[in-house]
Amino acid sequence: MKVKLWIVFVIVVGVLVSLDLWLKVWSANNLQNNPPRYLIYGLLGLSYYENTGIAFGLLSGHDWSAWVISMVKVVALVTLLVYYHRLPLENKYWFTRIPLIMIFAGGVGNLFDRITLGAVRDMFEFLFMNFAIFNLADVFIVLGCLSWVVSELLVVKTHANHEAA
């Protein structure tokens, strides 16, 4: 059964990372040095930006930050792999596995950019407020983290409480 879990893991991560990297290449080719494009007028747009720092551009311009960030990401990705592997085989843990896969894929997509370019390519921009520009990998990470918390609080914990009763 563990082999099937890892096959699913590799396939889904491969698809998600491919989507992220394809969108980053498309953005670099079509948005760089061009005005923003609207996805949803006045709400969400597409721009091209290379973030050399961490979240919200913090530490931009510091050469050492790319290496430190990359090492932290590698440790986080390995930790996610170990956690994924140690999850019990019961079906209720799919609600934990799916968010872990999303977080891992987002981390790999951004780590790939950081290692190959020294920056992360971002393209989504909220137009109604001054907020950070982000990419599909960031979306995977945020949605994965939120759904992981929900799964732990509502699905796994509730299921364990019912078994104890």
Image (cartoon, grey):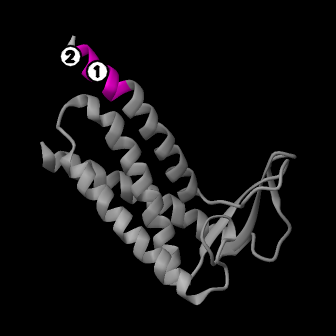
Instruction: Reply above or below: 65 against 160.
Output: below
Q: Magenta residues?
A: 155-162
Quadrant of res 37: bottom right
Judged by its main secondary structure, the magenta piece is helix
Report the label total.
2
Residue 116, horizontal then vertical, whole percent: 49, 82
Residue 100 relative to residue 85: left or right: right
Residue at position x 37%, y 50% in the image: 101
Residue 117, horizontal then vertical, whole percent: 55, 83
Element marked by disc 1? helix
Quadrant of res 16: bottom left
Q: Does the magenta stretch include residue 107?
A: no
Element marked by disc 2? helix
Residue identified by numbered label 1: 159
Q: In which quarter of the image is the N terminus?
A: top left
Q: Which amino acid does label 2 sit on?
A: Glu
For residue 112, say whether it is visible: yes
| Front one among 121 and 71 | 71
Residue 126 relative to residue 42: left or right: left
Residue at position x 66%, y 71% in the image: 58
Mark on residue 123? none
Residue 67, horizontal then vertical, whole percent: 47, 83
Within 10 Å of disc 1 (Cα), the crowding (few <14, some 14-19, many 20+) is few
Residue identified by numbered label 2: 163
| Front one among 91 and 16 | 91
Q: What residue type is labelled 1?
A: His
